[in-house]
Structure formats: structure tokens, C-alpha cells
Amino acid sequence: MASDKTPLLEVEHLTMRFGGLVAVDDVSFVAADREITAIIGPNGAGKTTVFNCLTGFYKPTVGMLRMTRNGSEFLLERMEGHAIARVAGVARTFQNIRLFANMSVLENLLVAQHNKLQLASAFSLAGVFGFKGYRKAEREAIDQARYWLDRINLLARADFSAGNLPYGDQRRLEIARAMCTGPAMLCLDEPAAGLNPRESGDLNELLTFIRDEHKTGVLLIEHDMSVVMKISDHVVVLDYGRKISDGSPAEVRADPAVIRAYLGEEEDEDLPDEIAADLAGKQEAGTARPEGQG
Ligand SMILES: Nc1ncnc2c1ncn2[C@@H]1O[C@H](COP(=O)(O)OP(=O)(O)OP(=O)(O)O)[C@@H](O)[C@H]1O
């Protein structure tokens, strides 16, 4: 473990089997609070399965997932997905964009705050009668949405249909939507997929802002090494479901086990430096922008 900071998420001996296939095999790591932790690895390494276990999509076959929020501990493997999001404060985005394409940009951010508004409406009565508490909650939800739209430079397009935004803006709107839920940990599944270099730069800036200004832990699955190596505080590497490396970006980048996993090298402890340095470039070249986007 690379960091001595406060643990936010402790994953212990996580194993997920699908019949005879072991998608995640005895993986342990710690993601610290207020840090960006990246989970990387070749296709099929088990990264998304880890996310699915964390967010309640799957019940792990074995293992413990302990989340600490404001001094309270939550065992995620025992919780339902909605409680993981609402009580433990784990927010997530997916590999494919899941905005409400026909709703406006602003509405997408208000929908994310539905739980808060529902509580304030006493499950509809106070909302129907326009009670003060509800109106206040509604104003706060709009303020929160406007704050994040300003942050991602979409305030002027608040009334546009989300589905008509350029691809990179949609990606950042998804992150803003997740942040409107006030999470303790933000889980992002390949947020840089399909982004051009300028959009990747904007993404890096947004994620470091979330970490530094909102003191939120970020867990990131990412293939784009220009993003991973630039902004991560800590990198965990999976291959065939097993953890093969865990450390700072520099440590992981120079780890022969990681280079072998990515480049398919034979056992060789003396890999030349340029191959290690090449790792970033090769991964970048492999990232394709989805067809018809942006
Ligand atoms: N619901 C499922 N049922 C059966 N096998 C699954 C299921 N989900 C994932 N797998 C398998 O588990 C393995 C790990 O998949 P996973 O999607 O977690 O990998 P990944 O590292 O996220 O890959 P990628 O980078 O391609 O998204 C793969 O062999 C995949 O086919």
C-alpha cells in the first residue's frame, strides 16, 4: 500500500466467481480518503467486476469491502445498492454514457438529487402544497446543480438536451451528476474513453479539483495512461483477476510484472527502460473514440 493517509475503502480478499470463472481472485487494497486511486489492467482483468462488487451489482463470493465515512464504517458486501449509494456515499459512472438524453442538462443534475427532494417533500405532500422546507430543498438542489454546471463550463447550456452535447461534455456532465449526490467516494469506469487530448486534459482538471477542493476520494478504472499516470496518487494493477502490483504511478510503471502483463513479455527482469516508458504511449494508442460521438 502506497499511502499512509486515512483509509476510505479497504478491500480484503475480494473474490468473485462466475461458475468456473474466477473474475476477481483474492484481491486486497486500500483506497485512501482524498486521493485518486486508479485500478488498471489489460482487458478482462476484473476491473469492472471490482466496481460491480463495490456498488452492490454483484454480491462477492468471498471478501470484505469496508467503507469509512465521517467516522462510521459500512460493510458494502452486506448492503443493497441503493444503501451503498445513499448511506455509504459511493457514487458511480459507467463505461457507456447513461445520461437522460432527452432531459435538459440541468434536469439531469436535479434528478440526481431526487432522494434529497423526496425526503423534503415528505414523499409528495409537502411538495404538492409547496411547503417552505420543500421550496428550500428545491432551491438548494438548483444551486448545487448550477455550481457543478459552472464548474464544467455548461451553465450557458443548462437548457440544452443532454443528448445533444459533445461527447466530452456528456462525460463531464455524468461526473457532475454523480457529484450532486455528495458522495464520499466517486467511482469512475473509464471516464477518458473516447476523449481527445484536450478533453482528457479537462477531465484531469475536473478530477483533481474534486479531490483537492471537495476532499472526495476517487476510484478510477482507466486504460488511458496519460490520465492515470498524471493524476493518480496510487495505482492498483490487476491481471487475470489477481493483483500484480500496487504503488505510486512511478513504482507501478517500472514494475516488470506490469510491463509483462501489458506487453506480453516473457519472464525477464531486465526489461529496458524505454519499454517501461513506452507503456503510456501504447495504452494511449489503444483508446478509440466511440463511433458517432462528439
Ligand atoms: N456477469 C458475468 N458473468 C460471467 N462472466 C463475467 C461476468 N462479468 C464479468 N465476467 C468475466 O469476468 C472477467 C473480468 O471481466 P471484467 O469486465 O471485470 O474485466 P475488465 O478488467 O473490466 O475488462 P475491460 O477492461 O475489458 O472492461 C472476464 O472474463 C469477463 O468475461
Image (cartoon, helix red, strand yellow):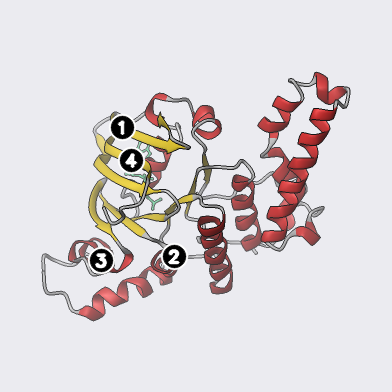
Residue in view at x 16 percent, y 74 percent: 271
The answer to whether the residue labelled 4 contacts the one labelled 1, judged by CB atoms less than 8 Å apart, is yes
Above or below, 70 relative to 283: above
Q: Amino acid at mark 3?
A: Glu
Q: Earlier in the sequence, mark 2 or mark 3?
A: 2
Q: Which mark is residue 33?
A: none
Label 1 CB sits under 8 Å from any ligand 1 atom: no
Residue 64's tag is 1
Q: Earlier in the sequence, mark 4 or mark 1?
A: 4
* 10 Å crowding of disc 4: few (<14), some (14-19), many (20+): some
Q: From the image, tell me which residue sits under label 2.
A: 231
Amino acid bearing label 2: Ile
Q: Which residue is mark 3?
A: 251
Q: Is residue 80 left or right of residue 240?
A: right
Residue reaching furthest to the front: 71
Residue 285 image-quadrant placement: bottom left
Q: Residue furthest right?
A: 129
Indicate whether 116 appears above or below 95. above
Q: Is mark 3 within 8 Å of ligand 1?
A: no
Amino acid under disc 1: Met
Q: Position of residue 241 (x, y in %)?
A: 26, 45
Looking at the image, which residue is at 71% across and 47% down? 144
Residues 102 and 203: in front is 203
The mark lying in front, picked from 4 and 1, is: 4
Place of residue 273 in the rendered image (x, y in percent of width and height, measured from the top left) = 22, 79
Is mark 2 in CB contact (under 8 Å) with mark 1?
no
Q: Is residue 290 visible?
A: no
The reply to whether discs 4 and 3 touch (Cβ–Cβ < 8 Å) is no
The residue indicated by pointer 4 is 10
Crowding near the residue tagged with mark 3, few <14, some 14–19, many ≥20 C-alpha atoms within 10 Å: few
Q: Residues within 10 Å of mark 2 (few under 14, many from 20)?
A: some
